Amino acid sequence: MQIAIVLGLVLVIFTAAAATVAWEDRRAARRAAVRRVARLARLGELDGRPSSTEPLSPREFDRLRRLHLDP
């Protein structure tokens, strides 16, 4: 009985750890994508979306430039 409780708790801890790692990986990927788009915007390039064929508007350029996190 006690071993089942311990194994259950270990399983819950591993599941929580795996969910946390997956969450942080997705968050890091989103932040990297935002930094990439902002870096392209700062250079005056297209925003990197495959469907985009138009250059950035000045308003979107300024918005993306403000999102840029690198110094």
Image (spheres, grey):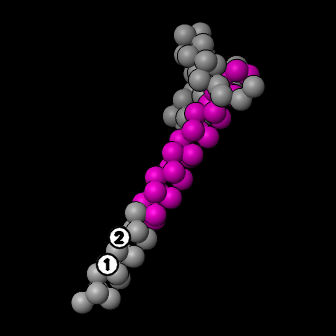
Name the mark on residue 12. 2
What stretch of residues is rendered in magenta? 17-43
Question: In this rendering, does residue 5 appear at all?
Answer: yes
The residue lying furthest to the front in this view is 2
Residue 4 is situated, as x and y percent measured from the top left of the image, at 29, 86
Eyeballing the image, is 25 above or below 37? Answer: below
For the residue marked with disc 1, what is the amino acid?
Answer: Gly
Quick check: is 39 in the magenta stretch?
Answer: yes
- Answer with left or right where residue 6 lies relative to residue 65: left
Q: Are marks 2 and 1 in contact (CB under 8 Å)?
A: yes
- Which quadrant, please, contains the N terminus? bottom left
For the stretch drawn in magenta, the main secondary structure is helix
Residue 61 is situated, as x and y percent measured from the top left of the image, at 60, 16
Q: How many marks?
A: 2
Residue 7 is situated, as x and y percent measured from the top left of the image, at 35, 82
- The residue drawn where x is 32% and y is 88% is 3
Task: Pick the residue in front: 48 or 8.
Answer: 8
Eyeballing the image, is 10 above or below 61? Answer: below
Question: In this rendering, does residue 57 appear at all?
Answer: no
